[in-house]
Amino acid sequence: KVMGAHDFAGGASVHVLGGTNALIATLFLGPRTGRFDGTKPITDFFPSSPASQCLGLLCLWWGWIGFNCGSSFGITDQRWVVAISNDY
């Protein structure tokens, strides 16, 4: 029986594997002590620099666009536009 769903480029298996790995890592690392219970001052938990955050965002975006286009039909001509529009 056909269920009417198509796993485009293996998206379901990729997200199940990623979620499972995240759960295992969270259980292995445990909670961040002092972060949310108020036992440490908020100044101990400053975020990374804005430049590092922007660089990380750029790396994630570039990997996302490369994976989507590469797994579907490659980054040639104007095909990457189709890959972006299909994800939104």
Image: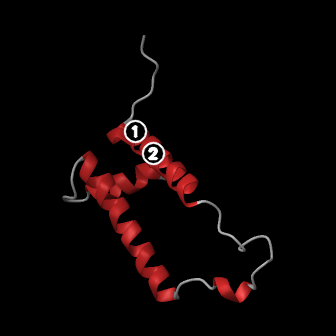
* Residue 12, picture quadrant: top left
The x, y position of residue 5, in whole percent, is: 44, 27
Whether 60 is drawn above or below 80: the answer is: below
**In 3D space, how far apart are the residues under numbered discs 1 and 2 (Cα atoms)?**
6 Å
Name the element at disc 2.
helix
Residue corresponding to mark 1: 13
Badge 2, how many Cα within 10 Å: few under 14, some, many 20+?
A: few
Whether 54 is drawn above or below 2: the answer is: below
The amino acid type, in three-letter code, at marker 1 is: Ser
Badge 1, how many Cα within 10 Å: few under 14, some, many 20+?
A: few
Q: Name the one closer to the observer, 46 or 61.
A: 46
The x, y position of residue 55, in whole percent, is: 41, 80
Whether 31 is drawn above or below 17: the answer is: below
Residue shown at the point (34%, 63%) measured from the top left: 63
Q: Is residue 58 left or right of residue 75?
A: right
Extreme top residue here? 1
The amino acid type, in three-letter code, at marker 2 is: His
Q: Name the one closer to the observer, 26 or 79.
A: 26
Residue corresponding to mark 2: 15
Residue shown at the point (54%, 49%) measured from the top left: 23
The x, y position of residue 29, in whole percent, is: 55, 60
- Do callouts 1 and 2 mark residues in contact (Cβ within 8 Å)? yes
Q: Quadrant of the N terminus?
A: top left
